[in-house]
Amino acid sequence: MGQCTGREYYEGMLSDYVAIINGLMQEHHYTEENVEHLQSKLKGFLKVQKSPTPRILYIADCHFYHRRLNTEMDRRGFGSVEEMNDHMIRQWNKKGTKKDTVYILGDFSLADGFQTSGILECLTGKKHLIIGNHDGRYLGDKCFEDFRFVSCQDYKEIRDKGRTVILSHYPIFCYKGQYRRDKQGRPRTYMLYGHVHD
């Protein structure tokens, strides 16, 4: 079947059903009224199938290829770094879609450029990197495929659902808009960071 959108898949499925039903009608297994009813239901099903709304997602401190995270710091407890990497790739792709925008708040990988490019190729979403203290190794490697990130910077401010979101690998004690509130007293600005793990 190859790669296709959800809508193409269901439209293809619908035309397959139509062909099958037409074949059955010729053999007198179904009446024309039965076929029209079935086709109507399938078209209704197609209308219900919508692509999920693209989201903005955030993650920090993946530390792909960082062996010590299994025994120290996070104590993730995987038997090997390969097992840890495979698990994180599966979890990432289970949560996100290719239409989602993902902001990685630093320390994505401790590997070289080639290995890190391979990990990024496996992950869904439009990926933006906020640079952390462990990202220099692969970013400085001539084998790294920098097109895997839509953007790559130390600090960024974005809008997400009417709020300002400040992105940094490191926590910022005082940040722009820190004390601004809406009429209900909710913050207008959020500061997201990684680095500290806990």
Image: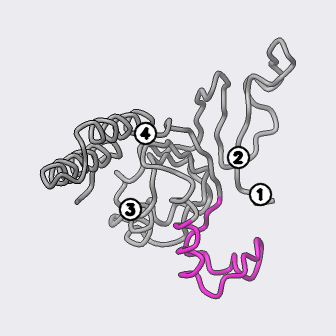
Amino acid bearing label 1? Val
Please tell me which of labels 1 and 3 falls first in the chain.
3
User: Furthest-bottom residue in view?
Assistant: 79
- Where is the C terminus found, in terms of image quarters? bottom right
Mark 4 element type? loop
Q: Residues within 10 Å of mark 2 (few under 14, many from 20)?
A: many
Camera-nearest label, 4 or 1: 4
**What whole-number distance in Å separates the C-alpha atoms at marks 2 and 3?**
24 Å
Amino acid bearing label 3? Glu
Q: Is residue 89 magenta?
A: yes
Amino acid bearing label 4? Gln
In this rendering, would 58 be left or right of 38? right
Camera-nearest label, 3 or 4: 4
Where does label 4 land, which residue?
Answer: 49
Which residue is located at x 79 percent, y 26 percent? 178
Residue 70 in the image: state x and y as whole percent.
70, 80
Mark 2 element type? loop
Residue 150 in the image: state x and y as whole percent.
41, 44
Mark 1 element type? loop
Label of residue 196 in the image: 1
Which residue is located at x 46 percent, y 65 percent? 138
Residue 83 appears in which quarter of the rendering? Answer: bottom right
Amino acid bearing label 2? Tyr
Where does label 2 land, which residue?
Answer: 193
